[in-house]
Amino acid sequence: MSPGLDITLLATADWDHPFWTNKQHVAVSLAELGHRVLYVDSLGLRPPTLGQRDRGRLWRRLRLSFPRPRPVRPGIWVISPLQLPLPAGPWVDRLNGLVLRTTLALARLQLGLRRDLLWTYNPRTAALLPVHAYRRSLYHCVDAIDTQPGMDGPRIRRDEQQLCHQVDGVVTTTPVLQERCRPLARRCTLLPNAVDVEHFRQALDPALPLPADLGCIPAPRLLFVGAIATYKMNMELLAAVARRHPDWSIVLIGAVGEGDPATLITALADCPNIHRLGPRPYGALPAYLKGAAVGLIPARINAYTRAMFPMKFFEYLAAGLPVVATPLPALEPYASVVALAPDAESFAAAVAEALVPDPAAAAERLRLAGSVTYSERSRRMLAFLESEPQGHC
């Protein structure tokens, strides 16, 4: 696809969220390829509760909805459209759709942007926007959002089916998501997650100092980076591993209850060798990875995780870490660089094996991570969209 496209990117994560996901990374890679990106902060998918967190988010939107789009990087502007915090329904969707269309039109007018490409992560897009008003459209399906806690699953599935029918192409990150979208889409392809290789390779720099709060924790350190949430993390497995090996330090970096406010961490709190450091800035992660011996992905296996491709997998590899995970379908093709273990006994055994240095395995991890950059994947996605339709994939 020719350079210089104007791309409207509908995200399901706010640009300023401390943990970057596909959305922010893709926006950056598209801008670096010479395109202009209007990044639309998350419109909200969960039914509103107007608790303290929702009230704060609504107030921020009221302040940010109508000024000029704010530049955040060369070629990237962010807007935070106001959406009425009401249960979804036909008239609410029509009103929120009108507000969204007006906000986008004003932003395009202010920035001089065309409607070249709609790039969306939001499965409800077709209920709010006229997809066909854009020259091209793409749905990047990276999660089974309908299976997350607190979501209106039936409504999201209906809207996602409509979106798959309307867009020019669908790109999924896992085979499970591909099988879900393929019967509905005109064109569909599978491209797994990617990684900011240069960022995470900083962990290999001998001059990079260890963070003080990590350096005081005894080695060997087994590191997890991500959401500490009941629906995502198998805390019971992790606690069992910690009890089996009190000489190992398990370090958790991330917010508790992200995406699942009902999360309880009793199992983790009872283990003195499990250290919860809380969230850390994206820029600081390589230093923490440098101080780790193994990267952990102790996912709870359920409808959501069976469809996910954890971003931390390639991030661990790019930092040179061996990886031990529970058996996620998306990771099965990478068995040469990840140990998949379904229970505490096999998980602990896999960690023990990963702690033994293996230079050949380390080289393979770095080679694989270097082949899956965001820039290359974004090029492939644009090429897929530009290529002639061949029917269902």
Image: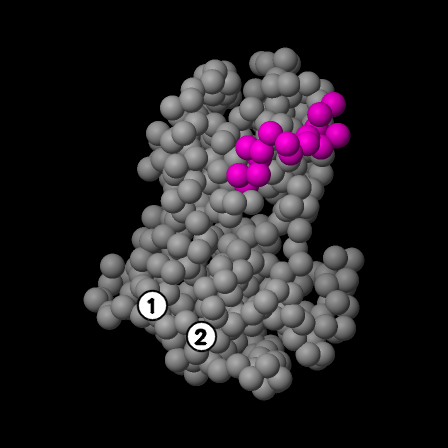
To which quarter of the image does residue 390 belong? bottom left
Horizontal placement of 139 versus 280: left or right? left
Kind of residue at disc 1: Leu
**Image check: 242 left or right of 33?**
right
Task: Classify the position of the N terminus by image quarter.
Answer: bottom left
Comes first in the chain, label 2 or label 1: 2
Residue 128 image point, x, y percent: 52, 76
Which element is circle 1 on? helix
Mark 2 vs mark 1, foreground winner is 2
Classify the position of the C terminus by image quarter.
bottom left
- In this view of the protein, can residue 82 be seen by the observer? no
Q: Which region shows up in magenta? A: 200-216
Q: Nearer the viewer, residue 200 or 351?
A: 200
Q: Residue at x 38, y 60 (%)?
A: 379
Dot 1: few (<14), some (14–19), or many (≥20) neighbours within 10 Å?
many
Q: Which residue is mark 2?
A: 5
Q: Name the residue rendered at 53%, 56% in the picture.
A: 25
Q: CA distance from mark 2 to mark 1?
A: 13 Å
Above or below for 300 versus 55: above
Residue 260, position as x, y percentages in the image? 63, 47
Which residue does the image show at 42% across and 42% down from the upper left? Answer: 370
Magenta stretch containing residue 272, yes or no?
no
Name the secondary structure under disc 2.
Answer: loop
Image mark for residue 385: 1
Q: How is the image coloured?
A: one colour
Categorize mark 2 by other alpha carbons within 10 Å: few (<14), some (14-19), many (20+). Answer: some
Mark 2: amino acid = Leu
Residue 204 within the segment the image draws in magenta: yes
Is residue 221 depicted above or below 24 in this figure?
Answer: above
Q: Position of residue 121 (x, y in %)?
A: 49, 62
Q: Which mark is residue 40?
A: none
